[in-house]
Amino acid sequence: MKIKFTKMHGAGNDFVLIDDRCGEVPWEDYFLMVSLASRRTGIGCEGIILVQSSEKADFLMRFLNPDGSEAELCGNGARCAAAFANAIGAAGKNLTMETVSCGLVDAKVDESGVCVWMPEPSRRDYGLSLNVDGQVVKADFINTGVPHVVVQVPNVNDVDIEKLGRALRLHPVFEPAGTNVNFVSFRAPSRMSMRTYERGVEAESGACGTGAVACAAVAVETAGFTLPIKVKTPSGYDLVIDGDWRKHKCTGLTLTGPVKFVYDGVIDLDEIKLGGDVE
């Protein structure tokens, strides 16, 4: 079974996008999706995005992590999905996508990039003290569609993200689902740099949209920052988080940034588990 795909990235966060409005892609085949996402034997990506038919919105965005699990939401993935859906004629420039766990998400596509209206943040748990290998790590937790821990550090480049990020991602406090982990350096007045250890990728991400929103919300609600906020990703791109401030909490948050179409291809799903060729 050969399928067409498009490789895209949003601010350095890379994805494989597939038009599955006919419902023919066997996305529930765990091993197939893992093989497809593999950088050595597949296409390689931080997430597989299927644009499927929806009765509630312009389309349904189904997001699969590189480990084959299904994610609740991906901010940069949603931005890429919006641009892709617009390009294939599944939606206009102002659109609404259905997500599996976070309901309907609105987006706008224009020449400056793609803006997505994010779900309302939930389950804030600020001022945590987490014991990691005998050391206490100060952190804040917030859910911005997916769970995120935010750790403030003087310089994000000095963090051993693979070691500390994984330890926090698997910390007992966040069982059983685990969490994404963001290390952030706040830079006044409304700028910051961040790096993310991403759940499902199980490594550092090139960028994380929901993580950028989490860092911005924590900065506004705990450190006196004001919206909009520019967040520098590890890949060197800026993501802009904007929204409103009501009752001492962020609301109506948007995530805006660049998306890029990298290349189109065709892959044989019957061969991919064996290391099939990409055209």
Image (cartoon, grey):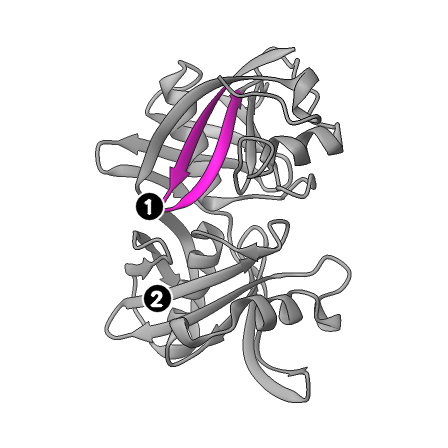
Q: In this rendering, would 67 be left or right of 208?
A: right
Viewer-closest of 255 and 233: 233
Mark 1–mark 2 Cα distance, whole angstroms, equals 16 Å
- Element type at marker 2? strand
Q: Which residue is mark 1?
A: 256
CB contact under 8 Å: marks 1 and 2: no
One can see residue 57 in this view: no
Which mark identifies residue 32? Answer: none
Which picture quadrant has residue 101? top right
Q: Which residues are magenta?
A: 5-18
At a point 26% along the width and 68% down the height, the residue shown is 190
* 7 in magenta: yes
The location of residue 19, given as percent across then percent down, is: 52, 18
The location of residue 33, given as percent across then percent down, is: 67, 31
Image quarter in which the N terminus is found: top right
At a point 43% along the width and 35% down the height, the residue shown is 106
Q: In this rendering, would 196 be left or right of 262?
A: right
> Which one is closest to the eye, mark 1 or mark 2?
2
At a point 70% along the width and 41% down the height, the residue shown is 69
Q: Amino acid at mark 1?
A: Thr
Q: Which residue is mark 2?
A: 193
Viewer-closest of 248 and 276: 276
